[in-house]
Image: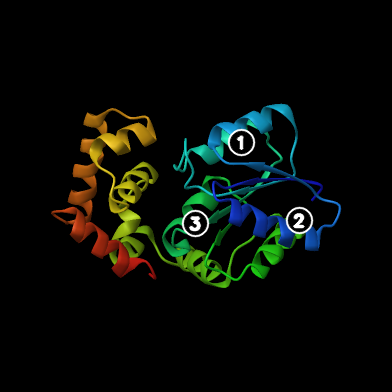
Amino acid sequence: MKKILIADDHSIVRLGASVIIQGTYSDAEITHATTYKEIFDHLMQSQFDLLLLDINMPGGNNIKVIKEIIDLQNDLKILVFSSYDENIYALRYIEAGAAGYLNKNTAMDELGTAIQSIQERGKYMSPSIRDLYVQTLITNKSAAQAANPLHKLSNREMDVAKHLIDGHGILEVSSLLNLSSSTVSTYKSRIFEKLQVNNIPELIELFKLHAVE
């Protein structure tokens, strides 16, 4: 891990991550980004070995950004570093092409372990995500959806639902995801129909209920 790009809009997180990384890789060259635009600017100018990515940053926050980043640098390893519940989002981002997913609430020393795992094996999964991954392999899709209705949602629907439970309105979600307001409204209707909820409070409760599934 010679060149590492830390992308997070919180300076304290970037500082803490830098300390952990330099403690593990003393010769690592670390670059910082605070928006998705800065990420792409850096990737256009230089090659990196690892991107430590906070998905909830200005200019992004959707699963398809993983493919967009990999399209720029095929060999780049992406470790998603997020406060979003890994039991809901981790496998989706890993399936999209990320090398791993680490929740920010995890002890910081786990970050060093995650980076070492990616360097040595190309992937990182926490014990709970490994268990969830195995469960998805041995359980058919319909049974998995019955156990956790959130699995019924497509990646795009999850993007929209994530913003809705964060308190964003239709117009805000439209701007954040670069979609028309009518498209966001359609996604919202599909989400409510698939999850059989009638309003945002019910949606929030459903996410809380199934966050550990």
**In the image, residue 207 lies at what x, y percent?**
30, 62
**In the image, residue 212 lies at what x, y percent?**
39, 70
Name the quadrant containing residue 200: bottom left
The residue that disc 2 covers is: 119
The residue that disc 1 covers is: 39
Q: Mark 3 vs mark 1: which is more N-terminal?
A: 1
Could you tell me which quadrant the C terminus lies in? bottom left
In this rendering, the label closer to the viewer, 2 or 1: 1
Q: Seen in the image, is 128 located left or right of residue 121?
A: left
**What colouring method underlies this structural image?**
rainbow
The residue that disc 3 covers is: 91
Q: Seen in the image, is 84 located left or right of residue 10?
A: left
Task: Name the one closer to the observer, 100 or 55.
Answer: 55
In the orientation shown, which residue stands out farthest toward the front?
11
Quick check: can you spot residue 148?
Answer: no
**In the image, residue 196 lies at what x, y percent?**
17, 56
Q: Are marks 2 and 3 in contact (CB under 8 Å)?
A: no
Task: Name the one closer to the observer, 184 or 168.
Answer: 168
* Picture residue at 60% right of the left edge, 33% below the top: 38
